[in-house]
Image (tube, rainbow, N blue to C red):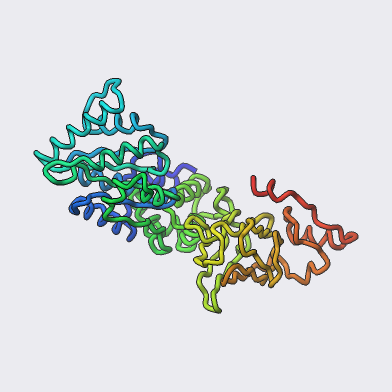
Amino acid sequence: MPVENLGLQRQPFDKTSQPTTFVVSQSIKDGLRLLRTTLDDGPGIGFIVGPALSGKSVLANRFVRETQSTMAVASVDGEGLYASQLLSKILEQFGYDVALNSTEELLNMINVFLVQQTRTVQPPLLVVDNVHRMYPGALNALCKLAQVRARDRFALRMVLLGQGNCERIIRSPSMRPVADRLCHDMALAPLSLKESMRYLYEKLRGAGAPRPDDIFPANICDVLHEASGGLPGKLDSIAAAVLDQSPGLPINLGNISHPDLHVDDGASPRLVVTRDGAVAEDCRLLATRVLIGRAELSDILIADHFVSKQHALLIWENESLLLIDLNSANGTFVNSVRVKSRVLRDNDIISMGNHRIKLIYAKAGTRTDFEDADLSDTATMQNIADARRSRAIHRLPLKVVDQAATLRK
């Protein structure tokens, strides 16, 4: 439905244009404070890491707009750039008309500009996003720029942003000129449940909604937060889809189709993560694919030395849940039995490392309902009614599908 029919002047979560409403979370506040401090410190290089859609680019753009009136600023997306491309883009941002020059000539031109600015005004600022996707030659060019000095101080401030293995790249021996100047770094945290609600409501108000809670009641905000994992960019995407697909108010998520939003007319599965009997996390399962592991980008993050970075995968489909061990070092156990894959039942206990995950999901049936079925290698899931029907008719085994094919979907 057009958003005008919902009382809005425009789509508040449109990512194709410059955002008109900037919502400041605690993590964004911390990031801005870090970047401002980077400008004042002698080494003058700051580094921010975070997963895709975590708000790094929004933070960088905000900082650039804040500083460009007081100093020369170049902001570059480093994805797929070679050295000559990186240097050309930097010069263009600094106002140079770049011809077909060699890499060495481009580097000399930037050096002259940096020294001149540092001696007469102050060191310029370079912001580079997606550092982890730059080619080695471009990273080497960054190192050369990091060594330029004028009047016994560095002639260029830098803000570097990336994700995944970016920190390992920045701190590698080949990047030592940059790493030696690194004075501040941080990881962007996802939005909290409360921050997600404020994020949604402030954007709705900016689009003309006098009462945002009439459009997204608190319970809807909770669902959107869980589905997005608190990532602002993902929250925008899901919220935009909800508004576009809603036939009117009140919003019914059961009518909405989105790959990260799994909502039906019953309760979604609940996962209770514990360690030594203490609850570490209690959450609703909303996505259809959920990665469990020690890696930072896991959907369910378990900080346990005995848990692999990508330990196991949960697949939710047709009211059934399939657990697949991803060749973890120490194994995945269901009710104390080591498994490679298993269709889960209500109150099953998943064990990995020192952690336990209890599934609470009545629609999955109980383990005694399926006591005669061999489910250890099942990768195609059926709903409870179908499974019971198969059990009643000659106790036919469930269809087995190659796990690799399931993971590729």
| Residue 31 placement: quadrant | bottom left
Q: Residue furthest bottom?
A: 277
Is 207 situated above or below 198? above
Residue at image coords 30%, 39%: 142
Q: Report the side of 395 relative to 92 (left or right).
A: right
Image quadrant holding the C terminus, namely top right
Residue at image coords 49%, 55%: 297
Q: Position of residue 245 (x, y in %)?
A: 52, 46
Q: Position of residue 346 (x, y in %)?
A: 68, 69
Q: Position of residue 388 (x, y in %)?
A: 81, 62
Looking at the picture, tell me which residue is in the foreground, 291 or 166: 166
Q: Report the side of 270 relative to 144 (left or right).
A: right
Q: Is residue 214 visible?
A: yes
Q: Position of residue 230 (x, y in %)?
A: 44, 57
Looking at the picture, tell me which residue is in the foreground, 357 or 124: 124
Q: Is residue 211 visible?
A: no
Q: Residue furthest front?
A: 173
Count of all numbered marks drawn on residues in the image: 0
